[in-house]
Image (cartoon, rainbow, N blue to C red):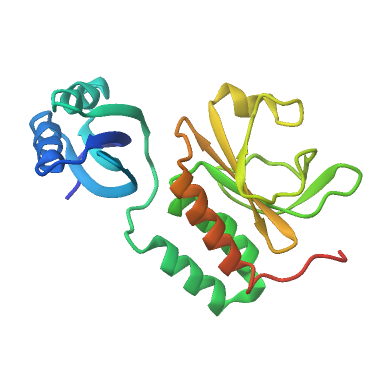
Amino acid sequence: MGQAGGVSFLLRLVLPDRPGALGAVASALGSAGADILSVDVIERAPGSAVDDFVVELPSDKLPDTLVSAAATVPGVQVESIRPYAGQIDPHRELELLDALAQDPGSALAALADGVPRVFRAGWALVLSAPVAGQSRVLASGGAAPELGAVAAPWWPPTPTRLLTTEDDWAPSDWARLGTELAVTPLGELALLVGRPALRWLPSELVRLQHLAAIAATVTPSYEHR
């Protein structure tokens, strides 16, 4: 249960891969007054794991409290922390794909709206193939910037990869907010996802690619529009 008047944060931690590490972190966060809402294992590597914790903290406590508490556990590294206003749903990807299949006519809008929740991102844009260097925004979701088109000197979207906000094509606001960009093909289209202050891990890019590949089978074609 959430705490009345609490504020939610997304805390990304690198944990040592040893028995009891997750429990020790949970205890440390609890002792700091945090209520853990969800834990997702994002990536595993030899000797460590990257976990995302969504936690709620009383409004009278600073987020630094979470960082300090997690750091008391030996071997734990705090990679990032940011406010989190998304939904908690352990079956996000399956539910999104099911929604796309049930209503293909609204698939692009549903995908753009659902991807930010799946990947705890800020926004997502579905883009057409560029004409004269500009890709039309066919659908947008989350806190997406209000853009009719995006410059696309990076086209094609294959392979799934990170894009830098430091290049001239990207709006300056994206770099100022520390937005981490990922792009993946969506059939003949592209799915561009922006996530402020939270880096993309290789395993997340693989998930994004797989999700987009499945979604492309039910999204409409815009090749000649």
Q: Report the residue at 72% width, 26% height from top.
A: 167
Question: Residue at the location (61% across, 68% down)?
Answer: 107
Left or right: 110, with 77 as reference point: right
- Quarter in which the C terminus is drawn: bottom right
Q: Picture coordinates of residue 187 (x, y %)?
A: 70, 64
Q: At x 21% / y 29%, what residue is drawn?
A: 76
Query: Looking at the picture, does residue 220 appear above or below residue 170?
Result: below
Write down the quadrant of residue 112 in the picture: bottom right
Whether 30 is drawn above or below 140: the answer is: above
Of residues 5 and 103, the one drawn nearer to the viewer in this rendering: 103
Q: Residue furthest front?
A: 46
Instruction: In the rendered view, tell whether residue 97 sits above or below residue 67.
Output: below
Q: Residue furthest bottom?
A: 102
Q: Find residue 10 and report its horizontal and vertical position in percent.
A: 33, 37
Q: Position of residue 9 (x, y in %)?
A: 31, 35
Q: Quadrant of residue 3?
A: top left
In the image, taking residue 143 as reference, residue 77 lies left or right, namely left
The answer to whether one can see residue 4 in this image is yes
In the picture, measured across the screen, residue 103 lies left or right of residue 198, that is right
Q: Position of residue 141 (x, y in %)?
A: 58, 51
**Is 5 in front, or is 8?**
8
Q: Quadrant of residue 166?
A: top right
Position of 138 compared to 181: left or right? right
Viewer can see residue 3: no
Question: For the image shown, how many numbered marks are present on the structure?
Answer: 0
